[in-house]
Image (cartoon, rainbow, N blue to C red):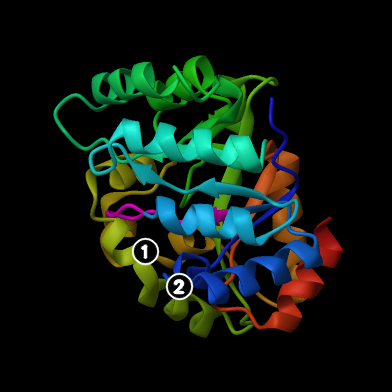
Amino acid sequence: MTKLGPLGGAYSDLNTADAATAAAAAIELEELGFSTLWMAGGPGNNLTQIANVVRGTARVSVASGILSVDQVPAAEVTAVYSDLEKTHPGRFTVGLGGAHGAKPLGTLNAYLDEVEQVVPRSRLVLSALGPRMLELARDRADGAYPYLVTTDYVASARKILGDERQLAVLLDVIPESDPARARDIAREGGMRFLATLPGYAANLRRMGFGDDDIAELSDRLVDGVTIWGDLDAIVRRIGEYHAAGADQVVVQLGRLSREWWARIAEAVR
């Protein structure tokens, strides 16, 4: 098992094609004590940027969060993983997801059949939300990387994954103490789009949110799946996710100042 550590960071500058800019951001986060850097793949292929960040840092784990199996050929994943293992062993964790066809479980299983010929299960994480996908993450990877989830969801996911698998939870963090403003900021991000996607909408319903909550991004929904407030409130909420069963909380860093990066890292490590 590859231990991801208690605190991860996700930051858009890590994905820039400018290797020097990406490395500078990564080094700063590494020195602050972030355990893992998660690099969002989105619909594209950012394996080159991932390799740049691994090579530009000394020790921090770097994870793809998430490479889409519908977009990135398995052979390219295994080639980059193999190259990095030769020069920077143990630094790249392969996060996979994005199977959106008629049979997503079958698609992921077939992809894993190819990838695991090179990448050990201990270095694989799946973007999993529903129970069947969590079971796949338990059986064929080292754990799961969900997003837009509550602490109750984390507790239920931990039961499915068991104690031997890892659970890294991606969270929007909003440094705003005014409730109305914080919720508006959350709604202005990608949440509104993601809530319309079938997989995310279904998972929100499983967590007890109704169609009106989802359509309107109700206060109850926003408060349940994001973190906002002053530093003490944010650190407290991160602790609640850890207590519910998350091995790692991954903080979206884009809204936070460098000072906040340092203060959160110091409080959580």
Q: Is residue 228 visible?
A: no
Q: Which residue is mark 1?
A: 191
User: Per the image, is 184 magenta?
Assistant: no
Quadrant containing the C terminus in the rendered view: bottom right
Q: Is residue 219 visible?
A: yes
Q: Which residue is mark 2?
A: 186
Quadrant in the picture for residue 44: bottom left
Alpha-carbon span between mark 2 and mark 1: 7 Å
Residue 233 placement (x, y as % from top left): 74, 69
Looking at the image, which residue is at 51% across and 73% down?
13
Nearer to the camera, 262 or 51:
51
Residue 36 badge: none
Nearer to the camera, 191 or 217:
191
Q: Residues within 10 Å of mark 2 (few under 14, many from 20)?
A: many
Quadrant containing the N terminus in the rendered view: top right
Range of magenta residues = 38-45
